């Protein structure tokens, strides 16, 4: 009479331990300020690129855009200071959080003088018109 090992059939044990710790690490890393990313959608049309970026809770004044050397840079800064006071005006709870987010995207053939942007309800919309084929310039380089 020997002991026979049977597989234990419980869905909890079907979890790959590596996946558990990977997800746990992601959750833990997500708790640190400044460890956020800007969620974006980029669409290429015949005459332009359209970038839609989510920056919820940020004020327009704390968002900066830059286009240099064919690279679009989106930066956002947010500071939240929550303070609770009792009926006598004494602080009973206070939390502060700071977050800085930044993303960069590379584009070719953009008419940088006509880039436009708008921000409403946490959505940043950027339109990058393409340079028309006849307006592109070639630079001949002389060899010495």
Image (cartoon, rainbow, N blue to C red):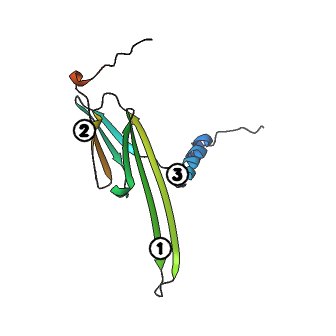
Residue 114 got which mark? Answer: 2
Residue 33 percent location from the top left of the image = 52, 55
The residue labelled by disc 3 is 30
Mark 3 or mark 1, whichever is nearer to me: 1
Residue 58 percent location from the top left of the image = 37, 57
The residue labelled by disc 1 is 83
Q: Residue at image x 47%, y 73%?
A: 83
- Quarter of the figure that contains the C terminus: top left
In depth, the one of 119 and 28 nearer the eye is: 119
Rendering quarter of residue 40: top left
- First of labels 3, 1 by sequence position: 3
- First of labels 2, 1 by sequence position: 1
Q: Residue at image x 29%, y 43%?
A: 126
User: Gap between marks 3 and 2, in whole Å?
Assistant: 37 Å
Q: Residue furthest right?
A: 1
User: Gap between marks 3 and 1, in whole Å?
Assistant: 23 Å
Residues at circles 2 and 1 in contact by the CB criterion of under 8 Å: no
Mark 2 or mark 1, whichever is nearer to me: 2
In depth, the one of 4 and 112 nearer the eye is: 112
**SS for tag 3?**
loop
User: Gap between marks 2 and 1, in whole Å?
Assistant: 43 Å
- Quarter of the figure that contains the N terminus: top right
Crowding around mark 2 (Cα neighbors within 10 Å: few <14, some 14 to 19, many 20+) is few
Rendering quarter of residue 114: top left
Residues at circles 3 and 2 in contact by the CB criterion of under 8 Å: no
Q: Residue furthest top?
A: 144
Rendered position, 44 above or below 29:
above
**SS for tag 1?**
strand
Residue 137 percent location from the top left of the image = 28, 22
Rendering quarter of residue 110: top left
User: Left or right: where does residue 65 sit relative to residue 10?
Assistant: left
């Amino acid at each position: 009479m020997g002991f026979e090992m049977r597989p234990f059939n419980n869905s909890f044990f079907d979890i790959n331990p590596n996946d558990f710790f990977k997800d746990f690490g992601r959750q833990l890393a997500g708790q640190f300020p400044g460890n956020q990313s800007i969620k974006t959608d980029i669409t290429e049309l015949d005459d332009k690129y359209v970038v839609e970026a989510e920056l919820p809770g940020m004020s327009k004044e704390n968002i900066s855009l830059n286009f240099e050397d064919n690279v679009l840079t989106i930066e956002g800064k947010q500071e939240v200071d929550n303070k609770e006071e009792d009926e006598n005006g004494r602080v009973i709870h206070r939390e502060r959080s700071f977050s800085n987010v930044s993303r960069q995207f590379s584009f070719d053939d953009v008419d940088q003088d006509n880039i436009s942007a708008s921000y409403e309800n946490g959505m940043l919309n950027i339109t990058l018109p393409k340079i028309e084929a006849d307006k592109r310039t070639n630079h001949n380089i002389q060899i010495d």
